[in-house]
Amino acid sequence: MVAQRVGGPALPAVGGKKPSYRERVADALRAALIAGELRPGEVHSAPALAARFGVSATPVREALLDLAKEGLVDTVPNKGFRVTAVSEKQLDEYTHIRSLIEIPTTVGLAVSAAPADLAALRPVAQEIVTAAAAGDLIAYVEADVRFHLGLLALAGNEHLVEVVGDLRKRSRLYGLHALVEAGRLEASAEEHLEILDALVARDEGAVRAVMTRHLGHVRGLWAAE
């Protein structure tokens, strides 16, 4: 149940800031989008979602306004909020920008990242693999966000992490559940361990190759729905 995620571990906050209740509700709404529980074109009211999530309407309404700023929902006068669709063109643009930022930044970590910092991310990478094997989409994406933003944070540029975090929110991977049924998610999950192995080996070429394949794989997952 998505409602259980509201009170559970929140998605990572940039700069170590503790997320507010409003932000935790927004994360739970994003999780519902990812899991396909809130689908493009559907209109939802804040009170109805609040009842579904087992929380009060005010933080849900505030969280929906935050999602509207991110382009994930549109306001519908006197009705609520409509879940927006992400076009193929938008996904291509998001992936292009991510590749321009994430690939060279991650390659640079092969030289600069401390072994202890890389080791700390291995349990998170394993969480992604475990979630993929279990078909737990919400756990998969939560761990995936922690891994990639945590990795980028090692470069020491908080604004870069914010930009990538925003791109990930906008692309959101709704409909990922169909890919679990097709058995295509675990290969992408394993790539997180490959990225760490290449970084630990200080192999810049391997890091670039795996990151390029990984982002291409992610775009393929988006396009497959």
Image (tube, rainbow, N blue to C red):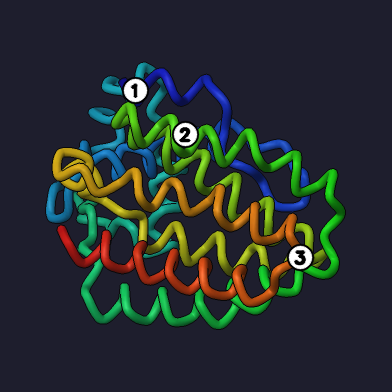
What amino acid type should be assigned to the residue bearing mark 1?
Answer: Phe
The answer to whether residue 80 of the structure is visible from this angle is no
Q: Which mark is residue 202?
A: 3
Q: Quadrant of residue 224?
A: bottom left
Q: Split into 4 quadrants, where in the image is the C terminus? A: bottom left
Please tell me how many numbered marks the rendered image carries: 3
Work out whether 19 lies above or below 191: above
Kindly state the secondary structure of the residue where label 3 is placed: loop
> Answer yes or no: do the residues labelled 1 and 3 have beta carbons within 8 Å?
no
Circle 1 Cα neighbour tier, 10 Å, few/some/many (<14 / 14–19 / ≥20): many
What amino acid type should be assigned to the residue bearing mark 3?
Answer: Arg
Q: Which mark is residue 165?
A: none
> Answer yes or no: do the residues labelled 2 and 1 have beta carbons within 8 Å?
yes
Disc 2 target residue: 25
Disc 1 target residue: 53
Q: Give the distance between the C-alpha atoms of the residues marked 2 and 1, in whole angstroms.
A: 9 Å
